[in-house]
Image (cartoon, grey):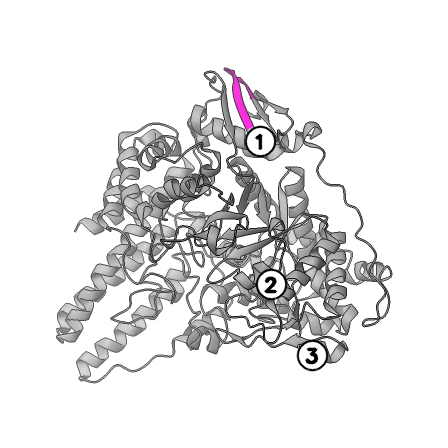
Amino acid sequence: MASRLILRCRPTLVVAALALLTAVSPAATTAAPVPAPVPVPGPPPPSAFDPSPARAGLERLLPSVAGQFELVAVEEPASGDYFSVSGTTGAIQVRGTSPATLLAGVGWYLERVAGVDIGWPGDSLARLPSTLPEVTGTITRKAAVPHRYALNDTDEGYSGAYRGFASYRHDIDLMALHGVNEVFVPTGAEYAYYLALQRFGYTAAELRDWIPAPAHQGWWLLQNMSGFAGPVSEQLIESRASLGSKIAEHLRSLGMTPVLPGFFGTVPPEFATRNPGAVTVPQGKWVGFARPDWLDPTGPVFARLAATYYWFQQRRFGDSDMFKMDLLHEGGTPGPVDVAGAAGAVQQALEAAHPGATWVMLGWQRNPSEALLSGVDRRRVLVVDGLSDRYDGLDRETEWGGTPYAFGSIGNFGGHTSLGSNTGVWGDRFHTWLTAPGSSLRGIAYLPEGTGGNPAAFDLFTELAWQPGPVDHRSWFAAYAARRYGGADPHAAAAWEQLRLGPYSTPSGTWSEPQDGLLAARPSLTAARAARWSPSAMRYDAATVERALAELLRVAPELRATDAYRFDVVDVARQALTNRGRVLLPRIRTAYEVKDAARFRELVAEWNAQVELLGRLVASDRRFLLGPWLADARAWGTDRAERDRLEYDARSILTTWGDRVPSETGGLHDYANREWAGLIQDVYAPRWAAYFASLDTALANRTDPQPIDWFARDDAWARGHKRYTTTPTGDPVALAAEVMAALSR
C-alpha cells in the first residue's frame, strides 16, 4: 500500500513549496504578516450532515449485510451525541448525530443484538447471520462525555509508522465503531516545520538532517530528540504529508476531529543566531539524546514562526479546532523564561491561527504544571490524563484547578505484546470522578503507546463513555466472551473469567501495564524485566492464564474458525508460555550457582525448547509477524539507500531504539520489545544462547563468564537486511495445544 501511495504523489515538494512560498513574504527575518488562514470548509451543520461516509464505512466493515442498515442523520441536541437502534429482521435502523456516531450505533447493535465482535484486533463476523436479527424495542445510548479521544503521541512509532492509508482508514472506522470522536494525527507533521523554517534561515538540506525518520518522529514532536535515522528525503516528507492529509480528511468526513500537532517553539540549532531578536533555551539531554532548542514564546520572533507554521499546516492538512502540544516534556527546562507567560503566548499564537481552538495537553508526570495552567484560558484546554488508572489518591480537580480533562489510561508501553490492563479500576473510578460535585471530567482518552493488542481493553475502555453508570466488571466480561467468538460457550466464558481475574484485574497504585516477558530481556540470571521502565514482577497470578488457555482449547469447534478466536488462542498461549519463563529462569540460576552442570544444561535445554515453541506459535498469526513491519518500511524508499535507512529506523525502534549512549546509558534498549516471529528467532533466542554458552564454559573451566557486548550484537541486527516472511505458517489451535501440553509436563 505504501508503494502505491508514493506513486500517487509525483508532484514534488519543491513545486508545492514554491507555490506556497510565493504567497508568503520573501524575507526570512523581516517577513510581512503571514496571510490569514485560508478558510477550509468544516463539517456541515449536525442537522444536515451527509450519512454517506458512514455508509461507506459499513460497506468496508460489513460488505455482506451493509444494505440491511438504514442510517438516519439527526440533529445533535444540547445534551450531546447519541444514537438509537431499532428495526425488524433484515431491516435495522440506526439514528445518530454524526457519521461516526451512526457507526457507533452499528457497533452497539453488532455486540448487543447480533452477538458478534469487531475488535482491535480480531473479529467474529464469520458468525454474523446473513439476515440481521430484529431489535426488541429501541436501544438508545447517549455519550456521557463530549470528548472521546484516542492515540498517544507515540502510537505511530510503536504501532507502525510505515502503514498505508487503507490501514489507517480501517483503524479510524474501528474507532468510530467504538464511539471515538477525536484522534491524534501526527502523520506528516514534519511538512509544516520543513516549509516554515526555510523562511527563517535554514536550507532544505539542513532541515532534512534535523528531522528524524518516521518511526522516531513522535519524540521529536515532543521536543525530546532530533535527526535520528536520517536524513529524510523530500519525497518522504511529501508522501507523509499526503497520507496525513488523507487521514485528517477521512476523520472530518465521519464528523470526527483530527487533533493536529501545534507549535510551541521547537527549533533547530543556531536559530537565535540566524534570527535577530530570537531567544532560545537549550533543553539539554533526554536519555542521552540532545534535545532541540526551545524558542522563547514571549519573544518577538515566536509569533511570526508560529503563524507561518500554522499557515503551511492548514493549507495542507485542513482545519481543526484541537491541537496537541506539551511544553517542557519529560525534563525540559524553562531557563529564564516565565512559564505562565510562555504558555499564554503559545495559546495566543494558536488562537490567532485557529480562533476558539482547544489546546490538548498530556497529563503525565508533573505536567501540566500549575505555573503553565496559570497562564492560559483553561476553558480552551483539554488535559488527556495518562495516569488516571495508574496511581491512587489522585485529585485532578485540585491539581489542575478545574481545567477540563479526560480520564485516560496508558495500558501498554512500547507496543509490548503483554496481555492485560487495569480494567477493574476503570469501571468505578471513571463514573466516580464524572459524577463528583463540580467535576471537570469531560472525556475519555485511550492512550496506549502502541495499539493493536488487548482488544478486550479497547472495547471496555471506549464503552465507558456510553454507559450511564459504573460498569459491572464480571458481567461485562461474561457478555464479551459470548460475542467475541460469535456465540455463547461455557468454555469461552470460563476462559474469559480467568483472564478477568488475572491479567485484566491488575490494580492501581504503581503501574498501568502488565509485566513484559523475560525472553526479550538482556540476558542475566537475575533478569526481572525486558524494558527498563516496566514492572519487575508478575502483576497477577500466572495460573489464571494457563487455566484460560485450557478452557479456550475446549471451545466448540464451530467457534474456533473465527478470526477473534484464532488470535486469542495464540495470544493467551503466548502469554502462558512467556510467564513460565519467570519460573524457569530462577531454577537455571540455582543450578548455576551450586555448579550443577548437568542440571544447568537440562534446564537450559528446557528454556530453549520453550523459546523454539514460542517462535513457531507466534509465526502462525500475521499480527505477530515481523515481516510486514519491515516490508512496509522498505516500501516507502525510492532507492536502495533510502530503503535501507527506513528499514534501520523500523528495526532499531524495536531493539536498540537509538545509538549506544541512549540505548545503554539511557536505558532505551528493548523498550519496545514484543514477542514476534523474527524477533524471537533472530534477536532474543541468539542472545540467550550466547549467554548460556558463556555460563556453560565458565562452569566447565571454573572461571567467570566472558562479558558480551549486547549493543554491538543488536545494532548489527538493526542494520541488517534479512527478509522475513509476511505470511503466517502453522495451525494456531494445534500449536496452542502443544503449548498447553508443554506447560502440563
Q: List x then y, in percent, for residue 696.
A: 22, 76
Residue 351 place in picture, x, y as percent: 71, 54
Q: Secondary structure at mark 2?
A: helix
In this orientation, does residue 207 appear?
yes
Q: Amino acid at mark 1?
A: Ser
Q: Tell me if label 1 and label 2 are in contact, CB under 8 Å.
A: no
Which of the pair 726/27 is nearer the observer?
27
Give the residue type at disc 2. Answer: Leu
Residue 450 visible to the viewer: no
Label 3 SS: loop
Secondary structure of residue under mark 1: loop
Judging by the rendered image, the residue that carries numbered circle 3 is 270
Give the magenta-colored segment's residue range: 83-93
Residue 518 image offset from top left, x and y in percent: 31, 63
Circle 3 crowding by C-alpha within 10 Å: few under 14, some 14–19, many from 20: few
Task: Specify the principal SS of the magenta part.
Answer: strand
Residue 511: quadrant of the picture: bottom left
Residue hosting label 2: 221
Of discs 1 and 2, which sits in the foreground?
1
On screen, 498 above or below 372? above
The local crowd at label 2, few if under 14, some if 14 to 19, many if 20 or more residues have their Cα within 10 Å, is: many
Q: Identify the residue at image location x=47%, y=49%.
A: 408
